[in-house]
Image (cartoon, coloured by chain):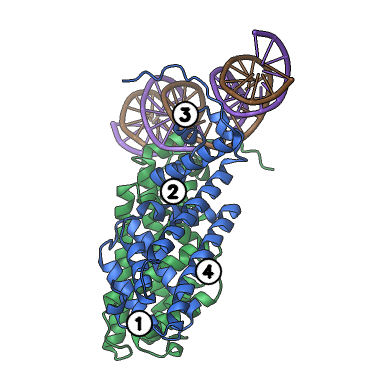
Chain colours: A green, B blue, C purple, D brown
Amino acid sequence: MTQASRPQRVRKSPDERRREVAAAAREIALAEGLDGLTLRAVAARIGVAPGLVAHYIPSMDDLVADTFGDIVAGELAGIVELIAGEPDAAGRIGMLVDTVLDGGRRDVTLVWVQGWALGARNDALAARVRIEMDAWQQAIADEIVRGQQAGAFGHEDADAVAWHLLAMFDGLGAQGLVRWRDDPDRTALTRRVLAGLLDVDPAVLER
Amino acid sequence: MTQASRPQRVRKSPDERRREVAAAAREIALAEGLDGLTLRAVAARIGVAPGLVAHYIPSMDDLVADTFGDIVAGELAGIVELIAGEPDAAGRIGMLVDTVLDGGRRDVTLVWVQGWALGARNDALAARVRIEMDAWQQAIADEIVRGQQAGAFGHEDADAVAWHLLAMFDGLGAQGLVRWRDDPDRTALTRRVLAGLLDVDPAVLER
DNA sequence: TATCTTATTGACCACATGATCAACAAGTGG
DNA sequence: CCACTTGTTGATCATGTGGTCAATAAGATA
C-alpha cells in the first residue's frame, strides 16, 4: 500500500479550509452519525492536524449544529427540486411521501433523530433544529395550499395538515431506524392518511 | 458538611446489588439520558467502586438496553393502569392521548428518542426497542378493538389506526424535545385526527 | 472465637475526547 | 533573493470512557 509518505504540509486559504472542514463534517455525520463527528475524524478526513480543525471552528458544538443544519437544509432543497418536476400538486405531494419514506435516507434520518436527542440538552442545536423544522412545515403547507388553489384538494387547514404529515414522517422515520415496521406499508399507510386529510382519492397521490 | 468519612465497605447479596444497579441506572437514564448512563455514574450513585458495577453487568451496552426496556415498559404499564379507571373506551383513549402528550414525560421521551438513535447502530438495543414498540402498538390496538366491540368506534383497521397514532406520538414527542410546537395544540391536533380515524366526534374523546 | 467464602475495593490499562499553544515553514510581497 | 505574515504542525493537557484483576475484608459458618 502507499506509504502515507511525509505529510508535506500544504497551505490553503482560510476560506477553502473552512469549506473543506464543512464538507468533511457533512460526510462524517452522514456516514457515522452526529456522534461520530469528532475533531480528529474531521482532521483525519482532510489530512490535517487536529489542531487545525480546532483553529477553524469556535467549538465542536458549533460544528455539530452547523453540520446538522447543512445536511437537513440540503435534504429539503433536494426534495423540493425533485418534486418540482411533477405537473400537479397531488403528484408532487405523492412523490414527497414516497421519497421521504422510501427508506433510502437512513443517514439523514439518523441525523434528524440525533438532532432531537442532542437538542434536548443543547439550546444552540435545538434552535437550529427548530429552524429546519419550520422550513419543512412551511414547504409542505405551501404545497398543500397550491393544491387547494388549483382545486385539487379540499379546504382543510393546510398548516394543521402539514404538521400532521410532518409528525408522521418524523415518527415513522425514527421507528425505521430500529427496523420496526420498516416496509412499503409505511408509504401505503401515509398515503391513505394523507388522502383522507386532503379529501382526495388515495390513487390520486400515486405517480 | 458531612465528611464522606471512611467508605466503610458494606457487603450485600448479589441479588440486592443487582437491584441497586438496575434502580440507579433507571434514575440516571431518566435524569441524564441514556448517554449519561456510565459505569462510574452508576457506581457513584450507589456509593460503590466502579469495578463492582462492572462485575455485575456483562457490559454497558447490556445495561443500557436493559434500562431502556425497564423504563419504557414501566411507562406503558403505568399508563395502562392509569386509563383503566375510565369507564368507556373513548374516555380511555382520550386520556391516553392527553397523558402521552401533556409534556410531563420529557425524560421518558428522551430515552425513547435516544433508543431509536442508538438502536440504529446497536442491534441488541434495536431488538429491545422493537419489543417495546410492539407492546405499545398492541396496547393501543387492543383498546381500539374494545371500543369497536362496544360499538363506540367505527370499524376501521385497528392495527393501522394504532400504528398511525403511535407514529404521531413518536413524531410529536421527538419534536417536543427541541420545544418545537410544544404546546397544548399537540393534544388538540391529535384528538381531532384520532376522532376522524375512529369515526367519532372529537368531543367524545374529552374526559 | 477462628475459619473461610466471596463481595468489594482501588489501582490499573488502553483508548478517546476537546482544546491550547509554542514552534515551524509555505508562499507572498518587497 | 530575502523577509515576513500566517496557515499549520505536533506535542501536551485535563478529562472522560469501559474494562480487568490481584488484594482485601465483611460476615456467615463451624
The reply, left or right, for residue A187 in relation to residue B3 is: right
- Observer-nearest residue: A50 or A177? A177
- Residue ID at (50%, 51%): B70
Report if residue A171 is visible in the image.
yes
Same-chain check, marks 1 and 4: no
Report how far apart the C-alphas of labels 4 and 3 lie in the structure. Answer: 46 Å
Task: Compare residues A160 and C23 and report the one nearer the observer.
Answer: A160
Q: Secondary structure at mark 1?
A: helix
**Residue on which disc 4 sits:** A103
Q: Can you give x and y, in whole percent of width and height, for residue B102 in the image?
A: 30, 61
Look at label 2 and name its amino acid: Glu
Same chain for labels 2 and 4? Say yes or no.
yes
Discs 3/2, front = 3
Q: Where's residue A132, x and y in %?
A: 33, 61
For badge 3, the amino acid type reads Gly
Q: Which mark is residue B196?
A: 1
Q: Chain of mark 3?
A: B
